[in-house]
Amino acid sequence: MSGQGGVMKNKWDGIVPPECSPNPKILKFNAGLEWEEAKEPLHDGIDVTITNGIGPGMPFASSLLKKTNSSFCVVGLVPCAVTGTKIIEWQKGTNLYNELVIRAEAALLEGGGTIEALLWYQGESDTVRLTDANAYKARLQQFITDLRGDLKLPDLLVIQVALASGARYYLEIVREAQLNTDLPNVKCVDAKGLPLEPDNLHLSTPAQVILGDMLSDAFLSGLPS
């Protein structure tokens, strides 16, 4: 979810598409647990393990404002992604899970508002070993169930992305789990077929923009009528 669009040899090209431009109505909850105007790369200061590039977060927010004629006062993004992690590293009690909950709760205390959805794009690392791929569905569902419980949001909308690519051989097992989650109010956006960077793993910048637009469609379709 942090995004590698425009990153080549650990260097970001600095190209920001119009759909990812800063907007006073799009805020980011930063690493210091404070709200600020969002800009690319969205995960700078959050995912410190890599060089961040363009991800789907900013184009999601921009598309959402455009499609709703800016009826949202503010779209607050709370980036929490860490690249290259397995779903087991996000299970309840892990550092990543705890940090996600802390940031989500702190975002509400600092700015009010409500948590409307979780956007979840993860899983390439779970395609390497058969045991991880086979366990993915159960682990993903447990993660969602635990998170909803800890945030006291039992009906939280979760929009996940079915992988466009995988690190190794078991991509289709993980994709099958993502496309067929047995939980209510979980939507899946399929990234398969979107253009990749030359590493054949990460989505390109144009693909991230398209994905952001797809996520906004899924979000709006998941709102109560």
Image (cartoon, rainbow, N blue to C red):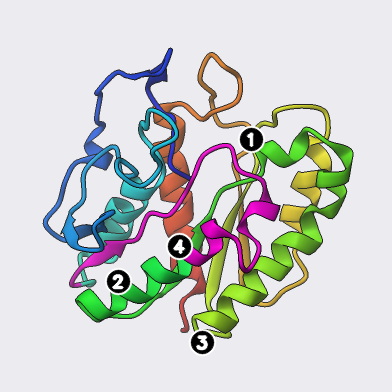
Find the distance from the CA under tag 2 to the CA under tag 3: 15 Å
Which badge, 1 or 4, comes first in the chain's sequence?
4
Per the image, the residue denoted by label 2 is 107
Residue receiving disc 3: 152
Nearer the observer, disc 4 or disc 3?
4
Label 2 environment density (alpha carbons within 10 Å; few <14, some 14–19, many ≥20)? many
Mark closest to the chain's N terminus, 4 or 3? 4
> How far is the residue under mark 1 from the one under mark 4?
27 Å
Instruction: Indicate the amino acid at tag 2.
Output: Ala
Find disc 1 in the rendering and name its residue. 164
Question: Where are the magenta residues, as a range?
Answer: 73-98
Query: Tag 1's secondary structure?
Result: loop
Q: Earlier in the sequence, mark 2 or mark 1?
A: 2
Structural crowding at the residue carrying mark 4, measured as other residues with C-alpha within 10 Å and reported as few (<14), some (14–19) or many (≥20): some
* Residue at mark 3 to residue at mark 1: CA–CA distance: 32 Å
Q: Is residue 100 visible?
A: yes
Residue at x 43%, y 42% (from the top left corner): 2
Percent coordinates x, y for residue 9 in the rendering: 43, 12
Q: Residue at x 70, y 28 (%)?
A: 167
| Residue type highlighted by circle 1 | Ala
Q: Are marks 2 and 4 in contact (CB under 8 Å)?
A: no
Q: Is residue 208 above or below residue 116?
A: above
Hey, what amino acid is under mark 4?
Glu
**From the viewer's perspective, is 82 left or right of 21?**
right
Q: Amino acid at mark 3?
A: Lys
